[in-house]
Image: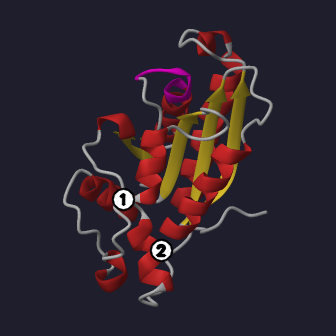
Amino acid sequence: MAEILALAGGPRRHGNSEQLLDAAAQGASAEGAEVLKLVVAELDFEPCRGCNACSLTGECVIRDGMREAYAALDRADGLLVASPVFFASVPARLKAFYDRCQPYWARVHVLKEPKPASRPAALLLARGGGDPYGFRSAVEPTKSVMAVVGFRLGWELKVEGVDSPSDMGQRPGSLAEARAIGAALAAFAASGSGDRAG
């Protein structure tokens, strides 16, 4: 049975991006996966201090809720990340979570440990209208941290024009696509094939 980590990156509970995440998690569960959901807004953790202590030990010196997140990231056979888009990027709390993944970078690039095995991942993004800069600044840092931690982005879903939490309910096609992505990711993770083909 594949274990899928579902990471809710929005600061508002049950908003549009989390609704996409829940749909994807349903798809993964229907495929037989065990899904662990972590809500970044509810994790008790500090931002990265930039102290570089992890370059000496490969471990973060801050003892907080990120320890639970590190363990979940290490165990996961696949990863779902969902986020709203704020000014073309991810919210501050999710970016702080990304920054706290620095120990993974230090292990490979400073301490010369082997790279972690590549596992499949999906990204689900929701944004309102009016921003001319789109999704790129949310996608690129997410791909960067995924690569460092040992995930390869194989599926993306980008939903525009959703502002209030009730808007996603008017997008049954987007929710269905999220479920399909979750199912595909879980099936691929269970196959043990590594990177998604193509």
Residue at the image position 76 percent from the left and 35 percent from the top: 134
Q: Quadrant of residue 158?
A: top right
Numbered mark located on residue 105 in the image: 2
Question: What residue sits 42% from the left and 29% below the top?
Answer: 11
Q: In the image, which residues are magenta?
A: 13-19
177 sits left or right of 182 in the view: right
Q: In the image, is residue 50 part of the stretch drawn in magenta?
A: no
> In terms of depth relative to the viewer, which is nearer, 103 or 130?
130
Q: What residue type is disc 2 on?
A: Trp
Residue 25 in the image: state x and y as whole percent: 49, 36
Which of the 4 image quadrants contains residue 66?
A: bottom left
Number of the label disc, if any, that sits on residue 48: 1
Q: Nearer the viewer, residue 130 or 192?
A: 130
Q: Earlier in the sequence, mark 1 or mark 2?
A: 1
**Mark 1 crowd level (few <14, some 14–19, many ≥20, 10 Å Cα):** some
Q: Position of residue 28 (x, y in %)?
A: 51, 41
- Tell us which disc is closer to us: 1 or 2: 1
> Which residue is found at the position 41% from the left and 89% from the top?
111
Side of 61 where 48 appears, left or right:
right
Identified by mark 1, the residue type is Cys
Q: Is residue 72 above or below residue 23?
A: below
Occupied quadrant, residue 147: bottom right
Most distant residue in the left direction: 63
- The answer to whether residue 43 is left or right of residue 110 is left
Residue 65 visible in the shown view: yes
